[in-house]
Amino acid sequence: MNKIVKAAGAVLWRSGPAGNEIAVVHRPHYDDWSLPKGKLDPGETAPVAAVRELTEETGYNAVLGSFLTTVEYSVNGSPKTVDYFTAKPVSGEFAPNEEVDELRWLPVPEARSLLTYEGDRDVCSRAEKLLIDTATVLLVRHAKAGNRDDWSGDDDLRPLSDSGRRQASALRPLLHAFHPEVVYSAPRLRCVQTVRGVAEDLGDDVRLDPMLSEESYRKDPEAGVQSLLSIAGSHRTAVVCSQGGVIPGLLDALARRDEVTLTRKLTGEVPSKKGSVWVLSFDTRRETPRLVAAHYLPSALPTPS
């Protein structure tokens, strides 16, 4: 069987005088109207590729929002998948280039009618209800920290292993695709080390939140949920690093409360591999943030958990 070609793209949107508008691009090589998208470079993750492709095709620097869907189709007999996100421009402007000779900002119904491919039109329809200013929480499980039984010191001080440090390094560009503004962590060294590089890139320190540790969560799960909601209500995009004994239960509680379907393992469990990320989108237009979308990203540098 042919190897799957992986790609990523986005519905780039802005608020226009008559409502929301999205960007559609004309590709002269194919003579089609499309959503911005392109193949992943070797070792690249879908969020990083989506941001890069947006810049290359539209000229805009963008911040990713909610995950939308994965479109699957075949190109010359080879299977292809495209992961789509919402995105908003933060700077830049369009100029014709080798890949794209025209960009149009259009209301969603007009954009949907212009798009050449059914898959793009379906993505457009799916995006319509998520074209709101959401808060993003990037919920990270700490990277690999070696075997607990092999560590003789205080478990709170168990550091990342060599592979864990590589995972943490690989997380940095993935998380920056969402333009985080603050970094929180459970007060465990391995959690702090996993996201410290992201905080350093922001010129900030990691903020400790005891409610996100396994010990505190076991004692009071609702306090953990409220802590995460408080973070979502206080920041546009936040990175939060926690532990395997917290993340599945916390997500289950939020999903049940707000009627959001989560990707699950065959066993029914919520996945939470070391070094993985849940992209959580919250509607903050009400007093208590409401979860509206959740997408699981496996480790950017896969290692056994």
Image (cartoon, helix red, strand yellow):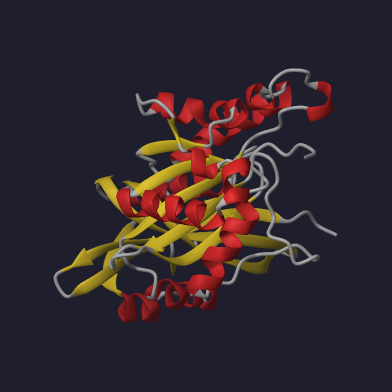
Q: Which of 231 and 181 is in front in this view?
A: 231
Could you say where residue 175 lies in the image, as x and y percent from the top left?
49, 40
Residue 206 placement: quadrant: top left
Residue 95 visible from this viewpoint: no
Q: Quadrant of the N terminus?
A: bottom right
Q: Quadrant of the C terminus?
A: top right
- Residue found 30% across the figure and 61% down from its top: 133
- Residue found 67% across the figure and 45% down from its top: 244
Query: Farthest residue toward the top?
Result: 153
Q: In this view, does 187 lie above or below 104?
A: above
Could you say where residue 259 lies in the image, as x and y percent from the top left?
52, 75
Residue 156 visible from this viewpoint: yes
Residue 208 placement: quadrant: top left
Residue 142 placement: quadrant: top right
- Residue found 44% across the figure and 78% down from its top: 125
Drawn side of residue 212 relative to residue 148, left or right: left
Could you say where residue 257 lies in the image, as x and y percent from the top left?
50, 71
Q: Nearer the viewer, residue 222 or 179?
A: 222
Query: Farthest residue toward the front?
Result: 219
Q: Nearer the viewer, residue 119 or 83?
A: 83
Could you say where residue 213 lies in the image, as x and y percent from the top left?
58, 40
Q: Is residue 123 above or below residue 297?
A: below
Query: Farthest residue toward the left?
Result: 17
Q: What is the number of callouts on the image?
A: 0
Q: Is residue 147 above or below residue 302?
A: above
